[in-house]
Image (cartoon, rainbow, N blue to C red):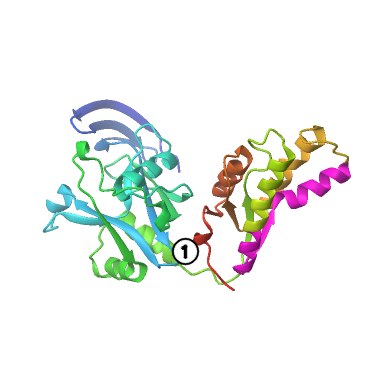
Amino acid sequence: MRPKIEIVKEEILSNNWYVLKKMTFKYQKCDGSWETQAREAYDRGNGAVILLYNREKQTVILTRQFRMPTYMNGNETGLLIEACAGLLDKDSPEDCIRRETEEETGYRVTNVHKVGEAYMSPGSVTEILYFFVAEYTPHMHTGQGGGIEKEQEEIEVLELPFGQALKMAANGEIRDAKTIMLLQYAQLHGLLHPVSKPQHILIAGPYRSNTGDDKALIEANMRLMNETALRVYEMGHMPVLGEWYALPLMETAGSRQIGDEIFERMFHPSAVRLLSLCDAVLRVGGPSKGADEMVRTAEVKGKRVYRDLGEISVLA
């Protein structure tokens, strides 16, 4: 159903904090008749929210801060427990939630995964909220969090057992809709279930980056990735390097030197194909555009991204 709308008048009632408008419009009903209606709409832009979770510790990161509207409507202290969130401003949802996560919680996360979007109060507010989840580990903690002082933010960071957070949502201690939605998403999709079976993990690191194509330096890069692969194998998983596939294939295809036409045609594309068959990526070593692209591709595909061996569950 696509109702016909004709805007009659648009009035700005307030432009103090954000924009409150009164919209007068004609609306064509299902029977074909038209009627004039008036509605107020609050435009504060779109936002993003994220649930940080840790499988090994079985915990989630939430925040607590004062919310005046809740104080005005029955929340005795005005304090509300929420998932980290913020307005997009001019950022993309992904960039926004990475920024807000670091500002509010002190965790610098990169492997954010979008799980949905929703209008949160469509009868009065224009906002679309983008929902994200991300795994966190202690080494991602880069600061105290707590928000931005100049924005008058005073945010308490909470690390809670996942089971406790679910109980708090059930008994009313957590009453924020976006947070309840993300906690239920995590429960329904088993985000905090410990990894109980071997993962196929692509080891992504520099091959020829910053080597000047010096063979000794390339061999050192390969040795680092192979040694990392061995450690992943001993942890009970199945590691793989794109180089294990690409190098013999390129030689068979007739490649004679690094950077020739066959090399460029097969080296990186073979790793991209391989990634589609893997469960996760482990980023190791120094700067590498190719390895960073593997990470970005994995994030887009919703695969896990590890940046430290300590983030990977030990099965054996």
Question: Can residue 45 be seen from the camera position used here?
Answer: yes
Q: Is residue 82 magenta?
A: no
Percent of width and height locating residue 22: 23, 32
Exactly how many numbered labels are in the figure? 1
Measured as percent of width and height from the top left, residue 163 is found at 35, 71
Q: Is residue 119 left or right of residue 287?
A: left
Residue 30 quadrant: top left
Left or right: 228 as drawn, with respect to 175: right
- Boundaries of the magenta span: 229-253
Name the quadrant containing residue 55.
bottom left
- The residue tagged 1 is 191
For residue 134, what is the image quadrant? bottom left
**Quadrant where the C terminus is found in the figure:** bottom right
Along the line of sight, which residue is nearer the eye, 36 or 151? 151
Q: Position of residue 204 (x, y in %)?
A: 62, 49
Question: Residue 273 location in percent, x, y?
Answer: 71, 48
Q: Nearer the viewer, residue 171 or 24?
A: 171
Residue at image location 43% in from the left, 54% down from the top: 133
Instruction: Tell me which secondary structure the magenta stretch mostly adopts.
Output: helix
